């Protein structure tokens, strides 16, 4: 198989039978009415950068948790509300509690909005992002509490489906279908020295699932208040 055929396997076979390729799955938090129009706008690429609304917002980041309702630029008129941001915050926390991922910069702190052909908008969360034995982007991971060889690392890709509002811990362990039909084949076109690194990180890449539409971050503030919030980064 080639990288392209591995991508098609992921988009068609895996997505259409995701429960069969996961270690476990759980219901997400109750979705607010405001979530559906937000996701429709995101799927269409109509979100744009939201202006103002939060003293903590860093362009093009937008903080939902302390912002007043605001409209997107252009014609979409999609309402961004506290309830939408609160939903993503609860989703992060539920994933953390159910799947034993910690909300830290070593572990679970971001996800990718992806528009798929068969399941609409999904989010692929990448937990266990900074293992102690895999140095990336100049980050000192030596104090990370887990490694790529730990069993928990095989469930680091968490897929949330907006249609069912469920999230799935995808099984990327040795011998799993995702390992055999996606991880091994998706790196076949890379240099032989790079390919093992891609397999080692057990990553289900967002651009292999569909069209990338943005990012959602769980921003952990270290002030005395120690409040937490989610930020959405809109894809350019």
Image (spheres, grey):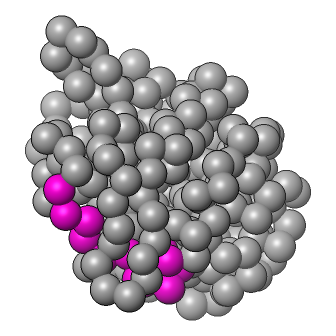
The x and y percentages for residue 175 are 74, 54
Report which quarter residue 93 is drawn in. top right
- Between 102 and 232, which is closer to the camera in this rendering? 232
Start-end of magenta stretch: 41-52
227 w.r.t. 182: above or below: above
The x and y percentages for residue 112 are 45, 61
Tell me which residue sits at (24%, 12%) in the image.
Answer: 225
- Between 116 and 176, which is closer to the camera in this rendering? 116
Residue 107 lies left or right of residue 29; in this view the side is left
| Residue 51 falls inside the magenta stretch | yes
- Between 190 and 70, which is closer to the camera in this rendering? 70
Tell me which residue sits at (76%, 70%) in the image.
Answer: 14
Tell me which residue sits at (50%, 85%) in the image.
Answer: 44
Tell me which residue sits at (64%, 49%) in the image.
Answer: 32
- Between 140 and 82, which is closer to the camera in this rendering? 82
Residue 16 lies left or right of residue 123; in this view the side is right
Whether residue 121 is visible to the viewer of this picture, yes or no, is yes
Magenta-highlighted stretch: main secondary structure? loop
Task: Give the quadrant of the N terminus.
Answer: bottom right
The x and y percentages for residue 199 are 49, 58
The x and y percentages for residue 54 are 20, 45
């Amino acid at each position: 198989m080639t990288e392209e055929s591995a991508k098609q396997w992921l988009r068609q076979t895996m997505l259409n039978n995701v429960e069969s390729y996961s270690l476990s799955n759980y219901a997400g938090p109750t979705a607010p009415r405001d979530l559906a129009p937000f996701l429709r706008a995101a799927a269409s690429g109509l979100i744009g950068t939201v202006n103002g609304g939060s003293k903590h917002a860093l362009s093009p980041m937008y903080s939902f948790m302390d912002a007043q309702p605001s409209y997107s630029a252009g014609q979409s008129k999609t309402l961004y509300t506290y309830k939408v941001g609160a939903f993503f915050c609860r989703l992060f926390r539920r994933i953390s509690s159910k799947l034993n991922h910690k909300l830290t910069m070593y572990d679970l702190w971001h996800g990718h909005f992806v528009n798929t052909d068969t399941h609409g908008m999904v989010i692929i969360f990448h937990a266990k992002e900074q293992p102690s034995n895999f140095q990336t982007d100049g980050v000192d991971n030596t104090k990370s509490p887990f490694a790529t060889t730990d069993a928990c690392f095989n469930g680091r890709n968490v897929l949330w489906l907006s249609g069912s509002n469920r999230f799935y811990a995808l099984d990327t362990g040795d011998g799993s279908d995702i390992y055999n039909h996606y991880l091994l084949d998706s790196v076949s076109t890379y240099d032989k020295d790079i390919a093992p690194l891609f397999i080692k990180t057990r990553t289900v890449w967002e651009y292999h699932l569909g069209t990338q539409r943005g990012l959602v971050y769980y921003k952990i503030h270290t002030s005395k208040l120690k409040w937490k919030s989610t930020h959405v980064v809109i894809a350019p």
